[in-house]
Amino acid sequence: MQGQTARKKIKTIKVNLDKCMGCRACEMACSGFHATPKFSSFNPARSRIRVVIDILNDEYVPVRATDYAKAGCDGRNTYTINGKQYSECSFCGNVCSSRDLFKEPDSGLPLRCDMCKEDPELKEPWCVQVCRVDALTYEETEEEGEEEEKLGDLEIGLDSLVDKYGLQKVIDGVARMSRKGQDVNLG
Ligand code: SF4
Ligand code: SF4
């Protein structure tokens, strides 16, 4: 209909660094939610939120997995916030080759925060729900524009495999698997 503009929902998780105490309950909740079946296992290494902890510097930074980056940056910048010095890596959610964060431990495939995508939608993402000190708070706003289509786990995983092995090897591998599947069905 003419004159009507689509509204898109913006989901945000705000982080209050002064409140985080490094309990890592958010990591456990996230890994449980994404386990198959849900909540059948809890392993922070599979979490899409990780808490960067530096006890000597009294530093606790919850950071969520964002994009898959083919290469790491030099990570040399530092930020001083309220007198504390933080490395830029403490705030970076990129899945990059320079560190082990946000890689599925068995496959090495990248993990990404999906805001706890669920149908029906959750009132709040799990990491926010379990944070007892409100270091994480959830906000929804609306703005004009079309909803962006986000890459799912499958596309992100394929992107990283193509980066690692090359497109042709991935295509050949999928073709081999599909032939094997066909043989099994026919057998
Ligand atoms: S649950 Fe909250 S307080 Fe605990 S580590 Fe996560 S963000 Fe920090
Ligand atoms: S919003 Fe959901 S998927 Fe994202 S980090 Fe929090 S618990 Fe994990």
Image (tube, rainbow, N blue to C red):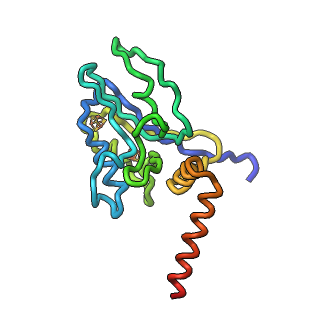
User: How far across and how far down the image is residue 104, in percent?
Assistant: 40, 50
**Residue 151 appears in the rendering:** no
**Quarter for ligand 1?**
top left
- Tell me if residue 74 comes above or below residue 107 in the rendering: above
Q: Quadrant of residue 129?
A: top left
Judge whether residue 11 can be spotted in this image: yes
| Vertical side of 15 occupied by 177: above or below | below
* Horizontal relation, residue 100 to residue 169: left or right: left
Task: Residue 39 in the image: state x and y as whole percent.
Answer: 29, 58
Residue drawn 61% across the image and 47% down it: 148
Q: Is residue 135 above or below residue 106?
A: above
Q: Write the residue at 70% across / 47% down.
A: 4
Tally of numbered discs: 0
Percent coordinates x, y for residue 70 in the rendering:
56, 40
In this picture, residue 112 sits left or right of residue 2:
left
Asked whether 44 or 73 is in front, the reply is 73
Position of residue 87 in the picture relative to residue 164 (left or right): left
In the displayed orientation, state which residue is furthest to the bottom.
187
Residue 84 x %, y %: 34, 15
184 versus 69 height, above or below: below
Q: Residue at x 54, y 82 (%)?
A: 183
Give the residue at x 43% y 49%: 108
